[in-house]
Image: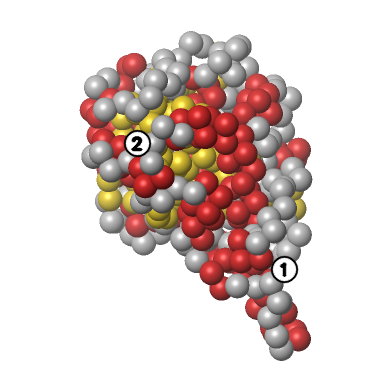
Amino acid sequence: MAIGLNDLGLVCSLGDSKQSVMTALSNSELSQPQLLTKFDKPGNDGTEFFVGAVSATLPEICEPHFNTRNNQLLLTAFKQIEHTFTALTKQFEKQRIAIVLGTSTSAISEGENAYQQFTDAGDYPAHFNYRQQELHAPSEYLAHITGASGPCYTISTACSSSGKALVSARGLIESGIADVVLCGGVDSLCKMTLNGFKALESTAAEYCKPFHSERDGINIGEAAALFVMSKQPAAVRLCGAGESSDAYHVSAPEPSGRGAIASMTKALQDAGIDAKEIGYINAHGTGTPKNDEMEANAIHTLGFDCLVSSTKGVTGHTLGAAGALEAGICWLLLSDFNKDEIIPANYPVAELDEKLSSIRLAASNSSGKIRFCLSNSFAFGGNNVSLVFGN
């Protein structure tokens, strides 16, 4: 069943509104140094990290136990869709309104800061509350500000978290459990993930280069992206979804792309279309040697002939928010916000490593009419999701 995505709110390194993000994606002069900046806290070994940080001024949150950067990002996204959400939900009882989010670290940065003070001074900040860093915290916060009392939960499967949140949200509507679902994802920058990926030797020395011969790792980013999902008519719909779990390795993808092939195949089947009908693929495209190799092979194997790009070169890898953020980019491309029918470039360059299977990387200022987009999110443990969107 195709489900309506009635509105979108998002914030990331590209901007803090639908229009600002679409404008940035349409800018042929867009560059990584504009968007990926040095994180203000070096790694445990002194490493300086380039990150996709949000520079916008974020709204204040008065309640101390909800006052986290993660929730500020979430509130920024929600304010953009509040009118649509209110208009759609006024006809339904509160218990028919659900919330499903994805995150990987929630507000762990507040815990890091609190523990640092404890280490230095022997006590925790007065405002610190452990509940801030629980995985359920962002979903609980949205329920608090919206009054929604239906199912409310968070999915945390690393980099596929919020992509899976959209699939789970659709399931609530299809099964008759909910009429409207506020769904998406959020993650904020913290030292834990930066040092963790550094320990895995997965961070880029400077800027990530998805699918390029000189790619050497990821840049981490932060973002929030929220959708209002319902059965009501919508200009952009979630048409198909596919999930797989190849369970090849705890942190490395299965080399041939078996799991990616399975999730994309299921998404196409669910949407009732074939690979030739997809007009654009937003690749997982992390910029790590192994991910890009297996994903290029999977896309090539399934016979896609459309333009492909990774937008992580300008947003950073937003981890638990990545699936929803990149779904949001697909939503924008299919919407009236994309008046020039832009297909975003593969940043920083659309230059495919000749050792990879052949795919059509999108160059700057590519354009074309798109009816269907596909977005991939592949996580640790082979936890994969592919989503098809249509207008």
Q: Residue at x 62, y 46 (%)?
A: 75
| Relative height, residue 334 to residue 125 (above, below) | above
Location of mark 2 (residue): 179
- Give 149 or 329, whichever is nearer the viewer: 149
The quarter of the displayed image where residue 388 is located: top left
Q: Position of residue 56 (x, y in %)?
A: 74, 43
Q: Nearer the viewer, mark 1 or mark 2?
A: 2
The quarter of the displayed image where residue 249 is located: bottom left
Q: Residue at x 23, y 39 (%)?
A: 175
Q: Mark 1 or mark 2, which has the lower sequence index?
A: 1
- Give 19 or 347, whichever is nearer the viewer: 19
Which of the numbered marks, if any, corresponds to residue 46?
A: 1
Q: Residue at x 41, y 45 (%)?
A: 94
Q: Position of residue 373 (x, y in %)?
A: 42, 24
Q: Amino acid at mark 2?
A: Asp
Relative side of 245 to 155, left or right:
left
Circles 1 and 2: CB atoms closer than 8 Å:
no
Q: Residue at x 35, y 42 (%)?
A: 96
Q: Amino acid at mark 1?
A: Gly
The secondary structure type at the circle numbered 2 is loop
In which quadrant of the rendered image does the N terminus lie? top left
